[in-house]
Structure formats: structure tokens, C-alpha cells
Amino acid sequence: MSEIYLIDKFSSLESRIHKLSTYSKIIFTVLLLVLSLFTTSLLKLALIFFLTLALIKAAKLPLKILLKISLYPLFFALIFALSQIGYGILPLISLLRAWNISLLILFLFSTTNYLKIFSLIGKISSTLSTLLFLTYRFFFLLLEEIENRIKAAKCRNAFISFSKTIKNAGLIASQILISSIEKSEKMYK
């Protein structure tokens, strides 16, 4: 079973952060998400990253597992960052921004039951709540597919040299991208 499914288990743990209200955790997370999205300062992004790590430790969550899970979206952010090479530190800012957002969302869902989160959002907008819930489900399905493809590639010794690793990582990324587009089109219909 994938480690990603442990998030639901983590949300039922007992810590001071777990006991905070859903509303306060959502507001705090959204604030840090907005700061991460709109800041262009590498220092501010690094501070948000280390603050999130400290919050994860304070919530008594397994840091190693959450860091590993948070790396999955970086795979796609890397494609975007590669297109920014030649623009100074912009690729690094893009990667750190994506990592912060991934880690913050993991923190929120690891400290709060997802039903409480979507219930609270549903009070604001049921349409938004439904869209976010579908995105939440799609995220887990996408991560599971990434994990399965990486396992299959490892079985075929796809990562034995640097050049094979780069080639096969690109193939996996393109297959996942095409698959996710196809799935989103099916959901749209």
C-alpha cells in the first residue's frame, strides 16, 4: 500500500495541532499558501519551508514520510523549472514554491480529517467544495499511478545509469501527463 494513504491515518493522531479548530488550520495554511505563491524572495520561501517542517514536527507527524510524499509534485514542477533556466534563480524559486505548497497541503490534510475540511469549505461554496474534493481524489489517483509506473520502471532496470534515469524519468513524466489529461477529459464529459 502506498504511503500516501497514511495521510488519513495521520489526521486521527493526537497532538496540540491536531486539536486546533479546522477553521484556524485552514486560515493559517491558506495564508502561507498565498505567501508562497506571491513572494519572489528565496529567503521568504525558505522561511515558510522551515516553518512548515517545524509545524510537522510539532504535530508529531513522520517528517521523512511527508517529505517523500511532497516530492511527487516536484517531479512536474521540475519540468516547468527547466523551462526557466536562464532566468537567474527563478527555477529555484518555482521549485521551492511548489514544494512549499505541496508540504502545506500535506500538513493540513495530515492534521485535519478531510471531511471536516470539505465540510467547512462547503459552507462557503458547495461548488468549490465539490471541485476541491474531486481534485483531492484525483491527486491520490495520480500519485498512485506515478508510484506504480516508477515501480514498473525499476523492475525493468530503468534507473541503472544517469542517462537511462533521465530518459526514463522523461518517459514516465510524459506518460503521466498524457494519462492525467485523459482522465480529466473523462471527468469533464
Image: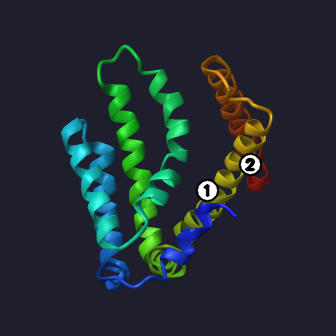
Asked if residue 41 can be seen in this view, the reply is: no
Q: x, y (%) of residue 92?
A: 35, 30
Query: Quadrant of the image for the N terminus?
Result: bottom right
SS at mark 2 in the image: helix
Q: CA distance from mark 1 to mark 2?
A: 14 Å
Q: Could you say which quadrant of the image residue 103 lies in? A: bottom left
Q: Which residue is drawn at the image coordinates 73% and 44% (left, top)?
A: 151
The residue at which mark 2 appears reads as 148
**Mark drawn on residue 139:** 1
Q: Which residue is drawn at the image coordinates 75% and 36% (left, top)?
A: 153
What amino acid type is highlighted by mark number 2?
A: Asn
Q: Which residue is drawn at the image coordinates 78% and 39% (left, top)?
A: 155
Residue in front for this viewpoint, 116 or 156:
156
Q: x, y (%) of residue 133?
A: 59, 68
Q: Could you say which quadrant of the image residue 140 lies in? A: bottom right
User: Seen in the image, is 82 located left or right of residue 52?
Assistant: right
What amino acid type is highlighted by mark number 1?
A: Phe
Vertical position of residue 161 compared to residue 139: above or below:
above
Query: Quadrant of the image for the C terminus?
Result: bottom right
SS at mark 1 in the image: helix
Asked if residue 134 can be seen in this view, the reply is: yes
